[in-house]
Amino acid sequence: MHSLLKFLAVPALALSAYAVASGGYRHTSIEIDLPVSTQGPLWPPSEMVNADGDFILIGNALLANDEGQIGMVPNQAVLVSKDTIPPLDENGVEDPDNWFGAPYKVIRELDLSEGSADMNQMLYANSFGPVAGSGGTPRIPREGESAYNLNKDFAVCRDVFPTDSQVTGFYRDRLPLHEVPILGFQGDNVAYDANTGEAYDPQLATSDPACAAFGCPGEDAVDERDSDAITLKDWVKSEGKLKIRLTNKNEDGDFTSARFKFRLKSMLPNSLYTVWVVRGRQIPVPGVYERRDIDAIATQNLLMTDANGNAKGIFDVNNPFPAAETDFTGRRIVGLSVVYHSDMQTWGGCFSRLGPGVDVHVVFNTLNSEADGPGLPDFTDFVTVAR
């Protein structure tokens, strides 16, 4: 595994810095191939797991070299143990503020060659619960499935979840990606308790006149969903192109906005995706500002694939790339991700209801690129100004 170690220089700074060239423009548009990934934040290690709950990671791996130094190694495809020990404080409690305090426990490298057993394995959404997890953050994986909470500092969106009754009592088991609960879906003969997350018989079927008044066991099959398992092969065949073009010059000749044009193909068919951006302020800088939740690229930020897995979308964003020397609030967009919603649900400006890998799963992430490529520490050299 040490042969994989191509550490980024000063990894913490690589993530927190976003200085770019200012003054003059080398170009006004770029087009990039979006890198396929299974990773959003560094913790949990991935937003996809296998049948045993181990993380299927395509992205950045936190590894230790022979001297015990921990660094981020980009462009990895590895299986990471669900029993990975995360950063811990002096009391042995998960420390979500210490990103580089512990390496992943890598089981092995993944074989991404055509027809391999890895490519044919079924993908799972991770388990969850309780909301009041160890380390002070919602527990992913769920309590009892691994020794530690691997969720870092992701906070559920209090606008929609949890209620007081859910804080200590809501759980969800690991589920195949194609069986993640769709709220209100009728056709799979199962519903889920809003307070506990437990499955129950909805008793909604009315096809038998003998029990029309109260409902028979199960549900009326009034809706359908794809019943085929989603494999790693299905995931990695996804293709995405993004073209960014600076727009709207002011009287001084400076650009004040940009247009983001997405073209996706070979995605999961008839599926819901959203686009999110990482701004400088979402990366914590000690003594400057704390981490904030990532932002939707725009309102709305939806991409819906057709029956062939194709989708297009255009989003206009005001002042997405202010120069570092004027960007006192960390507004500059330094990264971007496209996310699959296994529950077919969005929550407005909330990234997720439950957390990364439970109901949302990154498929493209510009932060999962080589250090000298389009990902870190910034994926454009554009500069925009406020209107």
Image (cartoon, rainbow, N blue to C red):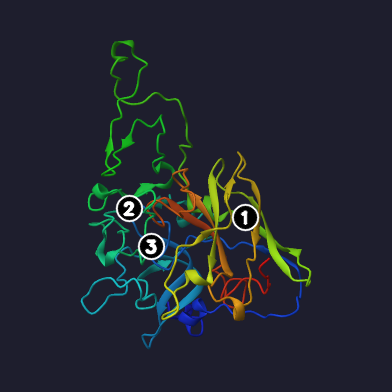
Q: Quadrant of the N terminus?
A: bottom left
- Which tag, 1 or 2, sits closer to the chain's start? 2
Quick one: label 1, few (<14), some, or many (20+) residues within 10 Å? some
Asked whether residue 131 is in view, the answer is yes
Identify the residue shown where x is 41% and y is 57%.
356
| Left or right of 162 on screen, residue 22 | right
* Of labels 1 and 2, the one closer to you: 2
Q: How many marks?
A: 3
Report the amino acid beneath label 2.
Ser
- Asked which secondary structure carries label 1, the reply is strand
| Left or right of 15 on screen, residue 87 | left
* Of labels 3 and 1, the one closer to you: 3
Residue topped by disc 3? 154
State how far apart marks 1 and 2 are (Cα): 28 Å
Identify the residue shown where x is 41% and y is 81%.
287
Residue topped by disc 1? 239
Callouts 3 and 1 close, C-beta under 8 Å: no
Report the amino acid beneath label 1.
Glu
**Most foreground residue, 167 or 173:** 167
Residue topped by disc 2? 127
